[in-house]
Amino acid sequence: MNSTELLQAEAAIIGSGPAGLAAAIELRRQGIGPVIVIERESEAGGIPRHCAHPPFGMREYQRLLSGPAYARRNVEAALKAGVILLLRHTVVSLEPGGLLHLATPDGPRQIQAQKVLIATGARETPRSARLLSGDRPVGVINTGALQNFLYVQHLKPFERPLIIGTELVSLSAVLSCRRAGIRPVAVLEANKRATARWPLSVFPRLLGIPMHFGAELLAINGCGRVESARVRLADGQVRDISCDGVLLTGQFTPESSLVRLSHLQLDNGSGGPKIDQYGRCSDPAYFAAGNLLRPIETAGWSYREGRRIGSLMALALSGQLPDANDALTLKYAAPIKLGVPGRLVRGELAGLAHIQLRVSQAVSGTLRVRAQGLELWSRPVSALPERRLLIPIKDLHLPEHFDQLDICIDQAVPQQEK
């Protein structure tokens, strides 16, 4: 392949995580080809490659797998289906109509695809974006870096870290530490309760790791490497916790730099591309799936979502999706932090099953969907931050002559802490 060659594909997929590979497998199952998956790393499989613990794969393969085993299964299934994997290829720009510019080990390349799926996932918020004060010693990392140290480089970055956050990924970090013989000194959570659901929320405590809720990390201290962390506890007491590392977990944000630099419309709430219930972006040549859409879901959820979007892309290739222009915009009111999709197209064809919501604070009340004051759907809810909240799209009867749906939690009040 020379530098002037333009590759042609029916479908191109950016990202080889669970969502991207599931979509690729489904497209091939429906006879679409060629299907090209573009991966910037030297190995396909996505984030699960770095999670050397279960549970992965129960719904997909009816087996309890570690992350690397699950990733290998996905890659093997894609190759068996006839998917073309381009490793160490980086998409540098998205052009209208499905034209992709790539940087590769052999120089710049272009791919012209009839349909493109963006499945670039999400990333944890780094220290710089968290505005943490104090020194800049070695040993302040996020979960992704920890798992890279342990499972790729086979190195231990610390022995006694302080873990920040209680999302599901925090429990993955605890498991990774335990497997490596690393003993966290404590887990800190800014809220008054854990983000992960019970009983996972008490997992660190079962391992003998102290958990401090309503606590704030004030500063990181150390010369050369981390020596301690200054924290404010829920009772207002300020103390220094001795540790040799700080592990920053969670606070995910979509890996949407390609979208931000492109012509595609961005969803300001989620930070990912704005899509309709068929996964279509503002340019109908582009689709999106997985944790790029909203931080953050499990690998299994992303796999199933990618598979569904793959089937919808196949329908789009045969011209069977409803007109993307006949759509209502969804407007979400606080304390709803984000909602996906951002548009709903009128039509009988089913797309994604649910509108997915996240709230910014613990709330209880009535979740309502309205169109110019006309209530279309409602139900009582009790919701916590980062927990999945769903509205079944099939229960909404989209009215004619309206161009917007308003979604709110009526009379929301802070949920009583237990």
Image (cartoon, rainbow, N blue to C red):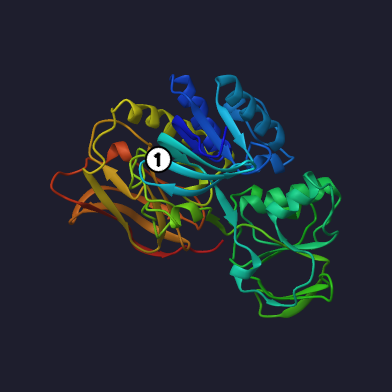
Q: Is residue 360 left or right of residue 236?
A: left
Q: Position of residue 259 (x, y in %)?
A: 44, 52
Q: Quadrant of residue 372?
A: bottom left
Q: Which residue is mark 1?
A: 98
Q: How many marks?
A: 1
Type of residue at label 1?
Gly
Q: Residue at x 64, y 25 (%)?
A: 76
Does the rendering let one see residue 271? no
Q: Quadrant of the N terminus?
A: top right
Q: Residue at x 61, y 68 (%)?
A: 190
Nearer to me, 6 or 393: 6
Nearer to me, 145 or 392: 145
Q: Is residue 309 left or right of residue 132?
A: left
Q: Quadrant of residue 240?
A: bottom right
Q: Position of residue 246 (x, y in %)?
A: 75, 65
Residue 370 lies, with reference to residue 66, above or below; the image says below
Nearer to me, 343 or 117: 117
Nearer to me, 174 or 412: 174
Q: Is residue 80 left or right of residue 403?
A: right
Question: Badge 1: how crowded within 10 Å, few (<14), some, or many (20+)?
Answer: many
Q: Secondary structure at mark 1?
A: loop
Q: Quadrant of the C terminus?
A: bottom right
